[in-house]
Amino acid sequence: MIETITQLARLRAAVAAWKREGLRVGFVPTMGNLHAGHHSLIALARSRADRVVASVFVNPTQFGPGEDYSRYPRTPEADAAGLQAAGCDVLWLPDLTTMYPFGPAAAARIHVPGLSQVLEGAHRPGHFDGVCTVVARLFQQVQPDVAAFGRKDYQQLLVVRRLVADLAFPIELLAGEILREDDGLAMSSRNQYLSPDERATAPELHRVLLRMRTMTLEGAPRAQVEAEAQATLHAAGFVPDYAVLRTPELQEPADGQPGPRVALIAARLGKTRLIDNLEFALAD
Ligand code: PAF
């Protein structure tokens, strides 16, 4: 039976008891409204740990002004039931004061330069400062041995990897694969904002990523791949923030140079902002 914990002292006692027994603790941080993608992260964490904690906290410091903080879907009962079915042991459900004792505006913040400032960071200034600030707090609270993050938030994964390496958190990071609906749309809590018409258009995002990969493998220069992706997204009714081809560390790859690549898109469809990516390799 999953235990829902709202007090930090109780969380610490539960984790300390596991550690006294020599058990490894896995952790999956979330903002709730959980879907199969989150549940797969629980399974991933469990594959490397004896006990798993998942947190649900809609973190205000990672939302910009005018973003969807207040309307972000909050479904704690359904989340607890889904987590239990997925094999999670503890749902950590902190309130705002537990997370930010001096209030979000006065919170000590963590900034990872460089990686935090491009792509998502350029379009959502301060977003990754908020993510790092809350992830560091969650790591301090849960003290996991292992933590799982999804590859759908590709840049977040890179930023968190840097955070863990730079601050020497003794935590093994696991990366979960992107889970997609049958039509290719990456699973996301934000998909439910889409109207029926927008939902029918949304899988085009994945098709554009596949086309970016095909063009790159056929030798098209990066500028052409990116320009065609932008044009296709516009024609389908999206307003793209970016559609780019990058190296795994988000550098601009030299045309034709073999190696791993990631195509990344962020685009608005009506009032909903969707992100997705596709990792592949350009062979010799
Ligand atoms: O990926 C998310 O859901 C959030 O950014 C995270 C990691 C839970 C931090 O609030």
Image: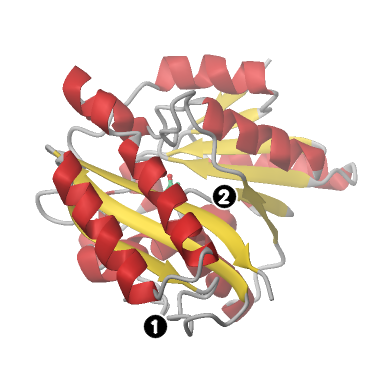
Instruction: Point out the image quarter for the N terminus.
Output: top right
Q: Residue at x 42, y 32 (%)?
A: 32
- Secondary structure under badge 1? loop
Ligand 1 within 8 Å, label 2 CB = yes
Q: Which of marks 2 and 1 is nearer the N terminus?
A: 1
Q: How crowded is mark 1: few (under 14 residues within 10 Å), some or many (20 or more)?
A: few
**Going by the image, does 281 lie left or right of 16?**
left
Relative to 272, say whether 5 is above or below. Answer: above
Query: Residue 259: where, in percent of width, then height?
Result: 63, 75
- Picture quadrant of residue 23: top right
| Label 1 CB sits under 8 Å from any ligand 1 atom | no
Name which residue type carries label 2: Phe
Image-based side of 61 in relation to 18, left or right: left
Q: Which residue is drawn at 9% across and 49% down?
A: 66
Residue 267 higher or lower than 168, as above or below: above
Q: Residue 114 carries which label?
A: 1
Residues packed near mark 2 inside 10 Å, few (<14), some (14 to 19) or many (20 plus): many
Which residue is painted at 49% across and 57% down in the image? Answer: 213
Measured as percent of width and height from the top left, residue 161 is found at 58, 68
Residue 194 found in image quarter: top left
- Quadrant showing the C terminus: bottom right
Q: Position of residue 218 (x, y in %)?
A: 51, 64
Q: Residue 149 carries which label?
A: 2
Residue 9 in the figure: left or right of residue 13: left
